[in-house]
């Protein structure tokens, strides 16, 4: 709640200046406050039903804010794509609530928690998988992750608040709040681990090829939430570290998105990093605050990411057996790639040759934009230490997930060893990025690139896959159903009408308008009636 209201307040202040020239800024702030209200309802509700109302509310607000500039066709398409992907996840949440009510007769968190011990594993697994589907939709996790990059069509403060700090982490909150279900459903918990591991690598890989600064940050958001989702699959202590990374990520990612907005403000809304270069000396405060967020996200001590992400990596390695090794290697690889592409973002934006032309000389943003960024940067520095010191967050979460009552197996690697390994791979990633992007760069992306880079530019073909696997079969199914509707359903309705018209035409011939015809019919009717009476009485 403090993250929503605290970061939300700073982003509101930032938006006063950022949106000052927009004629529709009143509508923007109305939508932004609608989102804050819905997000608070989501986290403060004591039941899945209350959570669902907030869940749908933030989805609506996100739809309205992504498409805020809907006069641009591409932005209108982006907001529809995000809305549809989220609706798929929303179906999962609604089904989970229905199954839970059918199983327990209750939808409150406390009521379901009390009954999980005696419940069927099959039913708990079904609920867990549906909750995971909901989390995948809202938190842009595999396989419903394709919408997040397109969501950058909205104003930058929206990207900072909704698509970095709060709404996209709602899936992490949902799984953590439902810990009693996942702890009793091993299959669902395993799927959480798989989804988190795949997404953290997926987001990191596509982040290496993005030239749009906001889309590069969106890819990093997808990857970092992958870490959080993976952590929630590691049991009680994992839930605590997932929430810890959620909080620290809220600070440094919001500051970086607002920093990107500051850069865009100084560069006349240009988002292509290939058109930047060397602007650090023109925007020193923006460069400094963005740099602090960069050090936090790659996990350099003593910045926030060092405490939160390193604990997830350590817990992954100590999960036990081959599973622990596989998860640990995945998280280490993600850390290395994150260091590479975030260093790339910093170099292409703030260092190197000037690729923007002197007529567009950048300028620093006004104080009303810089102060919120600076305050968030302080969180990038101190939040990790404050949350980790004395296990304050772990103790605070104990009533919900009981992280202190877990008996761990023998550790595969100690905290010191994990930190050394993490810092080593981070150093390798940073070094590779510096080696590749130091010196003068072109103002356009090179056409001849590796197969992996080409695939990453196209988001590893996720849109093509979705089109072939879902959209085209869906269109084909709809066309077939339409034919059934036209031929069978409409045919039955029309046949009733045809029979009625035919019968009416034949009966109409009896209505000739001549009195002699009516008299003859009356005689025939009377004779028929007399005959019937005679037969009955005989």
Image (cartoon, rainbow, N blue to C red):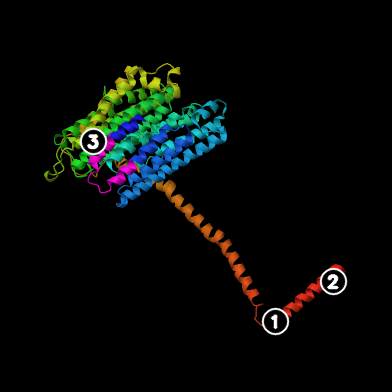
Query: Up-down: is 418 above or below 503?
Result: above
Question: Does dot 2 land on a helix, a strand or a loop?
Answer: helix
Q: Which residue is identified by label 2?
A: 534
Q: At numbered mark 3, what does the secondary structure look like: helix, strand or loop?
A: helix
Instruction: Determine the main secondary structure of the stretch shown in magenta.
Output: helix
Calculate the distance from the C-alpha at mark 2 to the C-alpha at mark 1. 26 Å
Q: Is residue 221 visible?
A: yes
Label 1, label 3: how far apart the Cα atoms are: 94 Å
Residue 400 point in image, percent of width and height: 45, 24
Residue 373 position in % (x across, y down): 24, 33
The one nearer the camera, 393 or 455, is: 393
Check whether the beta carbons of the residues at disc 1 and disc 3 lie within 8 A of each other.
no
Are the residues flagged by discs 2 and 1 in contact, CB closer than 8 Å?
no
Label at residue 259? 3
Q: Which residues are magenta?
A: 10-32
Could you tell whether 524 is left or right of 85 in the image?
right
Q: CA distance from mark 2 to mark 3?
A: 103 Å
Which residue is denoted by mark 1 in the rendering?
517
Which is nearer the N-term, disc 2 or disc 1? Answer: 1
Residue 31 sits inside the magenta stretch:
yes
Residue 474 relative to residue 384: left or right: right
Element type at marker 1?
A: helix
Label 2: few (<14), some (14–19) or many (≥20) C-alpha neighbours in 10 Å: few
Q: Nearer the viewer, residue 426 or 173?
A: 173
Q: From this view, report whether residue 454 is shown above or below residue 381.
A: below
């Amino acid at each position: 709640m403090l993250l929503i209201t605290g970061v939300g307040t700073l982003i509101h202040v930032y938006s006063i200046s950022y949106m000052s020239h927009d004629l529709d800024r009143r509508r923007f702030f109305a939508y932004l406050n609608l989102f804050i209200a819905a997000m608070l309802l989501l986290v403060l509700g004591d039941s899945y039903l209350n959570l669902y109302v907030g869940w749908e509310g933030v989805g609506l607000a996100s739809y309205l804010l992504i498409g805020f500039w809907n006069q641009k066709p591409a932005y209108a398409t982006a907001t529809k794509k995000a809305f549809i992907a989220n609706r798929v996840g929303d179906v999962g949440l609604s089904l989970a609530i229905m199954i839970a009510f059918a199983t327990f007769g209750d939808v409150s968190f406390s009521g379901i928690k009390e009954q999980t011990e005696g419940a069927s594993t099959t039913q708990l697994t079904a609920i867990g998988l549906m909750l995971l589907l909901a989390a995948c939709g809202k938190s842009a996790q595999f396989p419903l992750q394709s919408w997040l990059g397109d969501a950058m069509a909205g104003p930058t403060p929206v990207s900072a608040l909704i698509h970095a700090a709060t709404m996209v982490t709602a899936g992490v909150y949902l799984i953590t709040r439902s810990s009693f279900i996942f702890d009793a459903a091993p299959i669902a918990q395993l799927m959480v681990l798989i989804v988190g591991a795949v997404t953290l690598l997926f987001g990191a890989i596509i982040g290496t090829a993005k030239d749009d600064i906001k889309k590069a940050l969106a890819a990093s958001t997808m990857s970092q939430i992958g870490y959080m989702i993976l952590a929630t699959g590691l049991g009680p202590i994992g839930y605590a570290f997932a929430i810890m990374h959620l909080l620290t990520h809220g600070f440094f990612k919001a500051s970086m998105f607002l920093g990107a907005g500051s850069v865009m403000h100084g560069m006349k809304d240009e988002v292509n990093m290939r058109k930047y270069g060397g602007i650090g000396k023109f925007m020193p405060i923006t460069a400094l605050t963005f740099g602090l967020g960069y050090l936090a996200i790659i996990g350099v001590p003593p910045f926030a990411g060092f405490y939160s992400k390193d604990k997830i990596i350590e817990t992954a390695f100590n999960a036990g057996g081959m599973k622990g090794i596989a998860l640990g290697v995945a998280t280490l690889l993600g850390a290395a790639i994150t260091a590479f592409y975030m260093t790339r973002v910093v170099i292409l934006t703030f260092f190197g040759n000037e690729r923007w032309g002197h007529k567009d000389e950048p300028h620093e943003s006004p104080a009303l934009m810089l102060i919120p960024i600076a305050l968030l940067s302080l969180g990038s520095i101190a939040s990790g230490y404050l949350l980790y010191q004395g296990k304050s967050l772990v103790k605070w979460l104990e009533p919900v997930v009981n992280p202190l009552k877990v008996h761990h197996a023998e550790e595969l690697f100690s905290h010191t060893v994990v930190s050394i390994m993490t810092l080593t791979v981070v150093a390798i990633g940073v070094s590779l990025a510096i080696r590749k992007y130091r010196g003068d760069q072109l103002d356009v992306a090179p056409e001849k690139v590796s197969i992996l880079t080409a695939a990453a530019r196209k988001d590893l073909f996720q849109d093509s896959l979705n089109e072939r696997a879902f959209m085209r079969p869906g269109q084909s199914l709809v066309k077939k159903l339409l034919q059934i509707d036209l031929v069978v359903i409409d045919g039955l309705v029309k046949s009733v009408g045809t029979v009625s018209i035919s019968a009416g035409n034949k009966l109409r011939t009896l209505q000739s308008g001549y009195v002699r015809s009516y008299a003859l019919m009356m005689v025939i009717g009377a004779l028929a009636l007399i005959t019937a009476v005679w037969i009955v009485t005989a």
